[in-house]
Image (tube, rainbow, N blue to C red):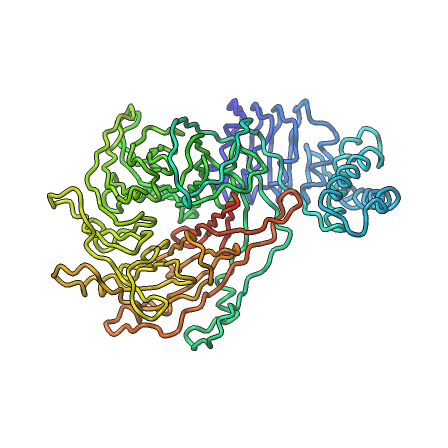
Amino acid sequence: SLSKLQLKTGDLDPRLFSRLRHLQKLDLSDNLLDKFPNSLTLPDLRVLNCNNNKLEDVTALKQFPLLEELTYENNVYLTLNDDYKVMFLLQNLRLLNGKDITKLANHVRRVNSRKLTSKVTAHWEKFFRDQLPEKYTAEQVKSIKKKFLKSVQTNVVYGPSSLSEFTRWRVKMIAEEFLAYSLGLELNTDPEPEEKMDENEEESTESPREAAEDVGQVGDFSSSINNVTLTPSKRKRNHSKPGSGNKRSKSQANTEEEAEDVSAEPLHFLQCHSKGNSREDFKTQLWSCVFEPLLDCGARKDPIVSSSRTVATCGGESVCLIDCETGTVLKKYKVATEEFFSVAWTTLTMVISDSRKKSHNILAAAGRRGIVKLIHVAADFCYGEIKAHKKPIATVCFSPTRETHLFTASYDKRIALWDIGIPDCDYNFKASQLLVLEALSIPLRIALVPTCPDQYLLAGCEGGCFAWNIKLDKEQKSRPFEALFQFPDEDGGMTTSHRVDGLAFLNDDVIVSKSSKPGCIYLWSWNRSFEAKGKGYQRTVSAVILAELEWSTTDLSYLTLSTCPAKDYVFCGDEMGSVWMYNLSNYTSAWSSAKGKRSDKRIPPTQILKWPELRANGEQLSEVLINNVVSDPTFTYLVVLTSVNITAIWKKS
């Protein structure tokens, strides 16, 4: 019961409500609600009381499909038309404002719908069918759709005039469904965004592929956001059989059953990083995403949400925080002159208000301007910045053992280690630089060695793969690299000079790295490679390669890879909008044994998720590059970042 609490719509926080998976009765009577947020997602709600509020619209109630009893008396703006709308939208509704409506609701859903559908169809046949030429363009379809929707709502009448608003609403819905079915026009099933921002800035299409510097700064948080969800017009079920050409051994067999096990369904397609919030922006490149760490609340830890479903994404001028289950953009942070390339989380124990220490998640975001923004997300507050480099920052990451230690890798060919300090109750903090690692070329990806994260750091750079000793008990602050790894080249020899644009650890020992030699992802052993270096001064070391993954033949760079160590998975997107997924659990134990020999054949993907056919403004989106793919630690969600300003969220089914 949340009755008589002076609640307004903004007080109903979707992040809280969407966790109430088993709530069946909710009393919101005697409050000040003017509408329902669209994403409360109470999947089990049966009884809802919202008497004595200021509700103006009931359509958002369709998010509670199991609702059986509903009361909203004394909401002066609601009319008989709204009663009919909820009867249509809520298929299980039995009682409305205390009355049994079963019989009437059946009439509304069946008879009424049937009559209106035949009238809508007849209107099209009589007045519009012949207006559409045999071969029509998207523009012609758009124009006819607009005219037809206007005409049909004006001319199709049925039932008493007191229900004309409901009839118009149903007619529009039926007409849109009819057009989608008969002309293959995509349906926009998503509600209008509740608020829009009104900036309209020019679009920028620069990317790390041509980094330059920018000046000026402004930052603001906003939760209101033009969150356009694109409706896939066809969803393909993915049981891929990649054309590998080589026969698979028994251990590699990709049976239908196994493929089923991996299968993922597309949940949401979000366009939430638009320049100036423009719906027309399909150019902003999205680069980095990281799942928020769970704050351990001891006994109060939510048993249902075992892994965080909140992800931070960045691209263009903004950083977004997204709830993967509901597709809600929870927060958005914008800096008009920035282009963000990388985000990273840490958890700091801070004293904020009542002098008690508490854990808080802090997000670091950086990009073209060489500045790291530090954001206390729960407080909607960017509390500080570190002017880390004079050139763009390609990537950032926090130490897993020292929560204030942040690495920044920059186009100035240096990787810096910072201590960001802990902010006091007024958010004063002191940042200091602890180390500078000298790279010979631009560092693109960095990874700390899991068994000794305070001692060694690896970086994939424009000119190769390097390792540094980062131990802080050494005197020298500026350090050259300690090892440079060489890999097989296309001519069968070994080379050190290649662009390494993907780098991650699969477990304590196995590194996955991608070089932009066409279609080339290697798995190699950190321990065995680094041991070969010995105590001498020899700095060039051959990577001890365990296997190679089959991947796209593209020579496009910066399509990066990621791993899910808990599930032995590797993910990498390609230039066609597909996501290649490799389940390596059958291989890891063999690799860890002393005799672990290299797998002769390239390992094919367990599955390839194909990009669904998405339409934007009637046009199919073409040339979708997958810049990044990241799963949460338990591999429940897969977040896919593209070159066309779309964040795709898949859920493992």
Q: Examine the image and state in which quarter residue 221 appears.
A: top left
Answer left or right for 62 relative to 341: right
Up-down relation of residue 582 to residue 369 (above or below):
below
For this rendering, which residue is in front, 400 or 184?
Answer: 184
Q: Is residue 530 visible?
A: yes
**Residue 305: % across, % down:** 42, 47
For this rendering, which residue is in front, 114 or 555?
Answer: 555
For this rendering, which residue is in front, 99 or 415?
Answer: 415
**Residue 486: % across, % down:** 27, 62
The mark tally for this picture is 0
Up-down relation of residue 395 to residue 525 (above or below):
above
Residue positioned most to the right: 126
Residue visible at 43% across and 53% down in the picture: 559
Residue visible at 46% across and 49% down in the picture: 639
Q: Examine the image and state in which quarter residue 333 appears.
A: top left
Q: Examine the image and state in which quarter residue 282 appears.
A: top right
Residue visible at 49% across and 33% down in the picture: 13
Up-down relation of residue 410 to residue 497 (above or below):
above
Answer left or right for 605 relative to 595: right
Answer left or right for 59 relative to 249: right
**Residue 72: % across, % down:** 65, 29
Residue visible at 46% across and 63% down in the picture: 553
Q: Is residue 102 visible?
A: no
**Residue 146: % across, % down:** 75, 37
